[in-house]
Image (tube, grey):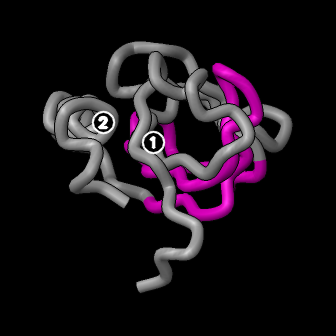
């Protein structure tokens, strides 16, 4: 496993803290338009994913890439998680990875 450039677990609220850095987020696809995917983060924020391949509406996708701003990620890797996913658990991982258990995450 390459640990030279770790991706921080983020939700929509935490994304603004990591602008310009490598992040990973779970997004539910809402629509695809003009080479960008619009989706909803695990905590309900609207995010734009640029550089991703179009995925079916309602699918969940984990995106690893660079946070362009507080509402946008430039995708490097997109993994389709399918039509169902436990967003509450993923959102909790984001909170733990940025809170009291931050030292356990890369």
**Quarter of the image with the C terminus in it:** bottom left
Q: Position of residue 16 (x, y in %)?
A: 60, 22
Give me the residue at 51% from left, 45% from top: 56
The residue beneath circle 1 is 25
Q: Which residues are magenta?
A: 51-79
Q: How many marks?
A: 2
Is 57 one of the magenta-colored residues?
Answer: yes
Compare residues 66 and 60 and report the one nearer the observer: 66
Label 2: which secondary element: helix
Q: Is residue 59 left or right of residue 76?
A: left
Give me the residue at 69% from left, 30% from top: 72
Give me the residue at 46% from left, 24% from top: 14
Badge 1 local density, few (<14 within 10 Å), some, or many (20+)?
Answer: many
Q: Position of residue 22 (x, y in %)?
A: 61, 51
Nearer the observer: mark 2 or 1; the answer is 2
The image quarter containing residue 69 is top right
Q: CA distance from mark 2 to mark 1?
A: 8 Å
Give me the residue at 58% from left, 67% from top: 5
**Quarter of the image with the N terminus in it:** bottom left
Mark 2 or mark 1: whose residue is earlier in sequence:
1
> Residue 62, relative to residue 37: is it above or below?
below
The residue beneath circle 2 is 94
Q: Is residue 25 left or right of residue 89?
A: right
Q: Are marks 2 and 1 in contact (CB under 8 Å)?
A: yes
């Amino acid at each position: 496993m390459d640990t030279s450039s770790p991706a921080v677990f983020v939700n929509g609220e935490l994304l603004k803290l990591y602008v310009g850095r490598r992040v990973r987020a779970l997004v539910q696809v809402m629509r695809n338009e003009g080479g960008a995917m619009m989706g909803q983060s695990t905590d309900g924020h609207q995010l734009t994913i640029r550089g991703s391949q179009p995925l079916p509406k309602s699918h969940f996708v984990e995106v690893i890439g660079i946070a362009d701003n507080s509402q946008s990620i430039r995708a490097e890797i997109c993994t389709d998680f399918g039509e169902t996913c436990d967003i509450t658990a993923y959102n909790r991982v984001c909170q733990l990875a940025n809170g009291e258990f931050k030292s356990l995450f890369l």
